[in-house]
Amino acid sequence: MAKLKNILTKRETVIFLLIIFLAFFVRFYKLAHHPVSLSMDEVSIGYNAYSLLKTGKDEWGELLPLAFRSVGDYKPPVNIYLTVPSVAVLGLTDFAVRLPVALLGALTVVVFIFLLKELGLRPASYLFGGFWFAVAPWHVHFSRASFEAVTALFFVLLGTLTILFTIRKKSVTYFSLSLVFFSLSVWSYHAERFFVPVLLVFLLFYKRNELSFLLKDRKKTLLSLLPFIIVIIPFIYLTFFSPVIRERALSTSIFREQSLIKELDSIESETFVGKIFVNKPFIVFRHFMGKYLNYFDLRFWFWKGMQYTPPAFMDMGLFYAVDIAIIPLGLYLLFTSKNKNIKALSLFWFFAGPVPAAFAMNEQHPLRSLVWIPVFGMAAAVGYEALSRKYRIKATAIYFVLILLNMIYFSDVYFRQFPRYFSEYWQYGFKEVALYACQNEDKYENIIVTDTFGSEVPNNTGLPALYVLFYCKIDPKMRLTSDYGFEKIKIRRMVWEKDNFLANSLVVGSFWDLPPEKIYSSAIVKTIKYPNGKGAFVFMETTNK
């Protein structure tokens, strides 16, 4: 606190602490309940952390793995290892799984404030930038679930900040720390595997004169690289000598998009001019550029980016609607700034930020493009400073009244509408299914749990076995036995016409497994509904006792 007082005035210190409190509050308020359920990825992260805690191995029996085998690909390791301490202290709970990312999400605001300060912004600007980042819907939402992109962004900003410290303090130690932070970001999430090397090359080239002191004591500089080498060599090994990185890249690549596949297959031109403009590299580049430019759509930024409601309803953008008054102005001021440091960095970040997301499947993906958010925080900071300098109290008062209204709307959409419309996509109900099955296991000879779910789209397939592992706290040593270590619980789609004749059994079916008119009301012992009131799961006892 004493060092903080030396950096900020008393008034600025109070504002700084209020911003940090706000950052923590919006990320931790009802954290275990919103989003409405742990996703399949979160349950997997939690159970793997639990397995590491109990056995030192992941759920598949691999000792301290550097990549965690999942369904169809491999998970980055950082979030799982960060979850081990919280599970050790708090137990295998929803809150324990979400705690590490929520914590890093709030601390990202602290790092961002000091990054803006290091870039030469005035107190009013970097404090406002911190406030903006603290409440930005884009970052708040992903901080409230165990999303690796939040962890990776934290390390990217920390690495950038320590590079700037390296230059100002002429410190080899900060340089070493910076490389380690950048390496951890690469280990944390897939998008950073492209973005961070490019960012690091840009920083080292652009700041080559300021970093030239590193060449004076080459022995010390080489020693400072050892932590970075230790951290990055295993990643290089996984990239070139295992399927871990390759499988993930292939599973999310734009080359899997049907529209691109069909276009590539339809190439027929045999003329010289045709081959220039109708060839596979050109078609891939055009497809990529279309996806890339879609990220600059203002509707994505300010109205529809977060997709909390169905298409016909009013939604939320990546930013609050009121920010349309300051972000475009701020971007213009950044790109024309006399401050060369922030001008160069913001230009690079603005154009490079969405590139990793554009190379992947799906249009306008807010999670894969989360690494883009810092440049908009910079723009908000300088845009606000410009408006407040010209209009002073009036502009500040109007902005904060409007953003308060925007935040009220965001809270309503996030806590009420989002669960109502999209709870099934977060596998809502599987927690209750798993808990009921485990609590009543001794009561039945068999418990059949469906792997289908949903009220709108037929035959969505989930992974209820993960929820049983997690909420029943199945011994990781038993996980590798047949049927996931479940003695009586069987995971398969129910067939009531046959399952009804099983002896003393419980059958759990989804809305799609059995039409309501075929269910014997006397057989129903429990039902689960989605927050929108539609049926989710039905628990039925068989008639053959």
Image (spheres, helix red, strand yellow):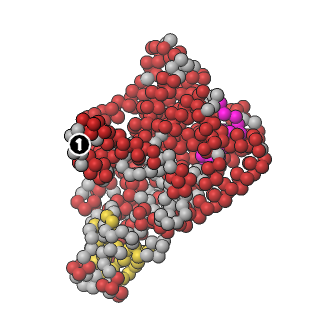
Residue 446's place in the image compared with 147, above or below, is below
Classify 10 Å Cα crowding around label 1: few (below 14), some (14-19), many (20 and above): few
Image coordinates for residue 404, horizontal then vertical, percent: 67, 57
Q: Which residues are magenta?
A: 120-134
Residue 401's place in the image compared with 216, above or below, is below
- Residue ID at (74%, 43%): 388
**Residue 320 shows up from this direction:** yes
Residue that badge 1 annotates: 269
Image coordinates for residue 448, horizontal then vertical, percent: 28, 72
Does the magenta-highlighted stretch encompass residue 256? no
**Residue 137 shows up from this direction:** no
Amino acid type, callout 1: Ser
- Residue ID at (53%, 22%): 207
Nearest the eye: 186 or 260: 260
Nearest the eye: 246 or 431: 246
Question: The residue tagged with tag 1: helix, strand or loop?
Answer: loop
- Residue ID at (55%, 41%): 374
